[in-house]
Image (tube, coloured by chain):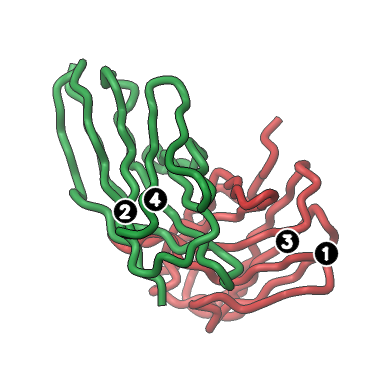
Chain colours: A red, B green
Amino acid sequence: DADVTQTPRNRITKTGKRIMLECSQTKGHDRMYWYRQDPGLGLRLIYYSFDVKDINKGEISDGYSVSRQAQAKFSLSLESAIPNQTALYFCATSAGGEQFFGPGTRLTVL
Amino acid sequence: KQEVTQIPAALSVPEGENLVLNCSFTDSAIYNLQWFRQDPGKGLTSLLLIQSSQREQTSGRLNASLDKSSGRSTLYIAASQPGDSATYLCAVKSTGRRALTFGSGTRLQVQP
């Protein structure tokens, strides 16, 4: 089984809809992250959490919110999706300075 | 603000060639540097992690070097194979920052 899992893997939605992307990990890491990837722009940090009570904005947090339900679970929400949020979204964990990524969620907002 | 650049953006080589991928960063105050591989539509797989105190790391046919003073890292791939075709991403963890800064990647194609 994968150490970092993301659901759903693919999602198509419409402008204005609320969407939640979920991430679970079995690595026992305290630190978790959400990134988005756009073609030609690399990965950019949306939010990160160093434990269940510690949540921080990344460089592109506008339009997103997160919830750290437990050490193993970190969810990303788009309250009202817009087309420029179409991207590949990755969850990651880290320990000892090394990051480990989930398989990604491809989100399309029409 | 840390900026990470990877050149070239794309590279095509015949099978068997040795090749070097380049990564440069603007702020030398780094904690570590990590190289990842990404297959189309897939997640990132960690290849090598170099701590700031290290000069290089090796794993199989891969060797990554780090020169903090010049703000450069290279990923050397020996005897390339078609299965090495993927996008290679470099990411830096800067001192005092809590997450990675990524380059935009080099897309490698190894021709059989």
The quadrant holding residue B111 is top left
CA–CA distance between discs 1 and 2?
A: 39 Å
Please name the residue shown 37% across and 40% down the image: B40
Q: Nearer the viewer, mark 3 or mark 4?
A: 4
Residue that badge 3 annotates = A74
**Residue type (three-letter) at the residue carrying disc 1:** Gln
Q: Position of residue B62 (x, y in %)?
A: 39, 28
The quadrant holding residue B74 is top left
Residues under numbered marks 4 and 2 in contact, where contact means CB atoms less than 8 Å apart: no
Residues under numbered marks 3 and 1 in contact, where contact means CB atoms less than 8 Å apart: yes
Residue that badge 4 annotates = B90
Q: Which mark is residue B72?
A: 2
Tell me which label, 3 or 1, sits earlier in the chain: 1
Helix or strand or loop: what does disc 1 sit on?
Answer: strand
Tell me if A91 is positioned left or right of B110 in this view: right
Helix or strand or loop: what does disc 4 sit on?
Answer: strand
Labels 4 and 2 within one chain: yes
Q: Position of residue A50 (x, y in %)?
A: 74, 65
Please name the residue shown 54% across and 48% down the image: B51
**Residue type (three-letter) at the residue carrying disc 3:** Phe
Q: Position of residue A63 (x, y in %)?
A: 54, 81
Report the chain holding disc 2: B
Can you say which quadrant of the picture contains the C terminus of chain A? bottom left
- Identify which residue, B94 or A106, lies in the foreground: B94
Helix or strand or loop: what does disc 3 sit on?
Answer: strand
**Residue type (three-letter) at the residue carrying disc 2:** Arg
CA–CA distance between discs 3 and 1?
A: 6 Å
Q: Is residue A39 in view from this perspective? A: no
